[in-house]
Amino acid sequence: MTFTDPNFVLNILNPLLLLKIAFLILVVFQLLFGLVVLNQVRVMNKSVTQPACTLIISLASIISLLTISLFLTALAILSKTECRREI
């Protein structure tokens, strides 16, 4: 498929493809946010020593792992489906 092929242009402008790309971008932002939260909780734990700190770190780690699994699942599902428009 070349750049001058009309089907190539239609496949790029496919709304489902654009929606998939937008969803993956949002999941990447969620992944980055989860990693930032995990880092902030670890920094907070160094400055504050309370008995509940291990619980907070555990919750932040679980949330980060769930976010990573969400990203990998979304990447696997969205990369497998076709977005072709037949003319």
Image (cartoon, helix red, strand yellow):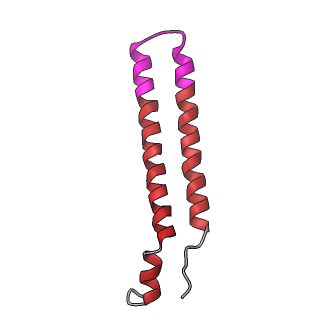
Identify whether 67 is placed above or below 9.
above
Q: Quadrant of residue 76?
A: bottom right
Residue 11 part of the magenta-drawn span: no
Q: Position of residue 15 (x, y in %)?
A: 47, 70
Residue 1 visible to the viewer: no
Above-or-below relation of 3 to 79: below
**Residue depicted at x 48% and y 50%:** 27
Residue interval drawn in magenta: 40-58
Q: What residue appears at the point 58 percent right and 33 percent down from the top-left corner?
A: 62
Image spot of residue 3 (x, y percent): 38, 86
How many numbered discs sit on the rendered protein? 0
Q: Is residue 78 left or right of residue 49?
A: right
Q: How far from the left and from the top, in percent, is residue 86?
A: 56, 85
Quadrant in the rendering for residue 12: bottom left
Can you say whether 60 is above or below 32 in the image? above
Position of the C terminus, as image quadrant, is bottom right
Q: Magenta span has 44?
A: yes
At x 42% / y 12%, what residue is drawn? Answer: 48
* Picture residue at 44% right of the left edge, 18% below the top: 45
Residue closest to the far top: 50
Residue 14 percent across, percent down from the top left: 47, 74
Q: Pick the residue in front: 28 or 57.
A: 28
Q: Main secondary structure of the magenta part?
A: helix
Res. 74 visible in picture: yes
Q: Nearer the viewer, residue 79 or 18?
A: 18
